[in-house]
Amino acid sequence: MKRWFAILALLSWGLAAPVAVLYDQLAPALDQAQALQGKNPVQALSVLTDAENRFREGATDLTPVLREGVLQSLADAKQALSKKSTTDLSARVQFIKAILGKALYDTYFSDLSSGKTQEAAALLPKVLSASGLPASLSAQANTLAGANDLDGLRRFFERTYAQGIVSALGRAQAQTAAPQAYLETTRAYALYLVVQDSPKARSLTAKAFVDALGKLSRGDLEGFKNDAKALSTQAQAFLKSVSAPPQTQLRSTAPRAAVNPPRSGGVRLQAPVAPPAPKEHPVTASLLPAKAQPGAKSPAGVGPLSLLGELHPLIQDPQKAQRVATQLEGAGIRSLEVWRRTLRELRGSLLEAQAQSASGQLEAAQTTLSQVAERYRSAVQPLTEALNPALAARTAAVLNRAASTGGLRIPDFTVLGNELLENSLSLQGKSLGALQGFQVGLLNAVLGVPRAFLFLLVGFLSILPLYLLGLTFGGRNPYWRYLGLAFFLLLLPAMLEGLSYLGAALGEMVPALAGLVSLSVQQNLVMQLVWGLTLLLAVAFSILGLRGIAAQFGLLPDRTPREAPLHSPTLPGSTSKANKSSSRSTHETIVEWDEEF
């Protein structure tokens, strides 16, 4: 599935406390997701989703570019999880930490220049951790900060980052495996992003790093080596410039001006074409940067301006329309047609999840459903929420419920697909009707444990009437055996449905049982035909059994002609005792209880 890939403008003006808190929330979740990627991808995806939700709720004070950029990078990380790309996930984690690391770095110096030494000291371990630098550097940094030597402290950090960039590029050139070279180059790029505003780092550019990563992603190893060599030369020049002793300057007695972090620099969101993957692990993002200036407007026909023009007839509130356009732009939606196409793609992904679920690939189905829920939330829900808040909340709830539970059947996916169609119709003010809303509410109510418990209980209890029937009437009479077979065939679908839910419940723990989900009558065409055949056989056996029993009771007319018995002559109007006795005897013989019966 194609996705938008992003590198962000790193704007960190005035983001002290929020960035520190959000970093403390995000960093452990990112590390946990990496640790769980190979063991439990579904849980890893859940960890990232929870972290994203917490970030979204707590990042309301961040600049929109930073906030949407982190969210986009988290979405890319989840895509890397779904594609089982260790390289891509590690790269995404480095970029997310670099984004927050840049904000922490600038805030650290801003606090020191403002006299907030305690706040700065609390931020320092996070600055080092975000860039993967050793904690032992804090001692020297605190010494320089205590001496109020901010220039020396900045040179110390720039020298440390420059050394890291040179070392990472050296390791990248020494690698023979493309994925490892990609990660080392990404490491160098992430370090550069933190100190990119330094005047002494002008020899390095984001474009140079991105070009090298793009060539490596496309398999152009020769081009990558040339670019990496040039980058290494430029990084060594940067290191040399920050390692030189500072020139003696005349100090004035005027108070020192606060050193504020620059507001420019970094890169903005782009929509690149996914490059070819390396041999071992797919590297699914080519990183195309462009400098973003705060407040800059997009060219005509590009970005949120064109989308905003389409939204104005739908959303009367200009501020709400602008907010929706910004959110959709961050998710890669450039027009309403792209928004509609995204909905169609999501419905196609539901068909993919349906096929995975029907074939017993339960983990893959949950991953696909989680992707659908996430993509809906970021790329579709903002517009639907502005037009129909109840529909947006309903759709998000049912998609999240479907992604977090197993045992979905084909009718469930039909309801989910219709719900996405309902979102598309909301642009025209149309709806599928009240039945769709009722089905979604019902699905939300029974999905998961309630419905699974019901069918497991019915499947288990179906055995009891068959046992009692055999115990009571089982024997030599073939007609009751026919009825027993009819009962069995009628209850067989219930038993299979119970086994199907058992497979869904235990499939993750015991993969061999996952195949039981295909026994559901609601899951595939084969079982529907089997169900039809069992109904036909049940009808046939019930006819045979009940007809035989009815004949034994004498309830069916006897069409066989019989000879009249010879009687002794009697007077007209009289009846002999023998005839009466014979008639009564014959009648009693017909209704007499059969020993086999």
Image (cartoon, helix red, strand yellow):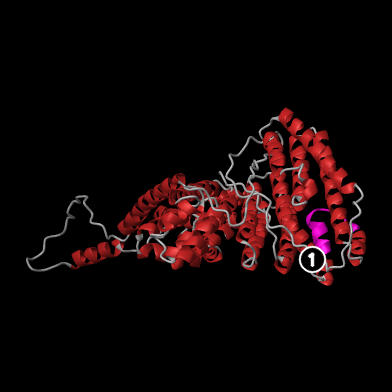
Count neighbours of disc 1 (C-alpha within 10 A) and say few if under 14, some if 14 to 19, many if 20 or more. few
Where is the N terminus found, in terms of image quarters? top right
Answer whether residue 103 is visible to the viewer in this image.
Answer: yes
Tell me the residue that label 1 is attached to. 257
Residue type, mark 1 in image:
Ala
Q: How far from the left and from the top, in percent, is residue 201? A: 78, 46
As drawn, which residue projects farthest toward the top? 222
Residue positioned 75% across, 57% down in the render: 101
Magenta stretch bounds: 124-137
Drawn side of residue 222 relative to residue 575, left or right:
right
Residue positioned 80% across, 47% down in the render: 200
Drawn side of residue 155 relative to residue 490, left or right:
right
As drawn, which residue projects farthest toward the left? 572
Residue positioned 79% across, 67% down in the render: 111
Q: Nearer the viewer, residue 210 or 107?
A: 107
Drawn side of residue 9 relative to residue 397, left or right:
right
Residue 135 is one of the magenta-drawn residues: yes
> For numbered disc 1, what is the local secondary structure?
loop
Q: Nearer the viewer, residue 251 or 527?
A: 251
Q: Nearer the viewer, residue 63 or 246?
A: 246
Where is the C terminus found, in terms of image quarters? bottom left
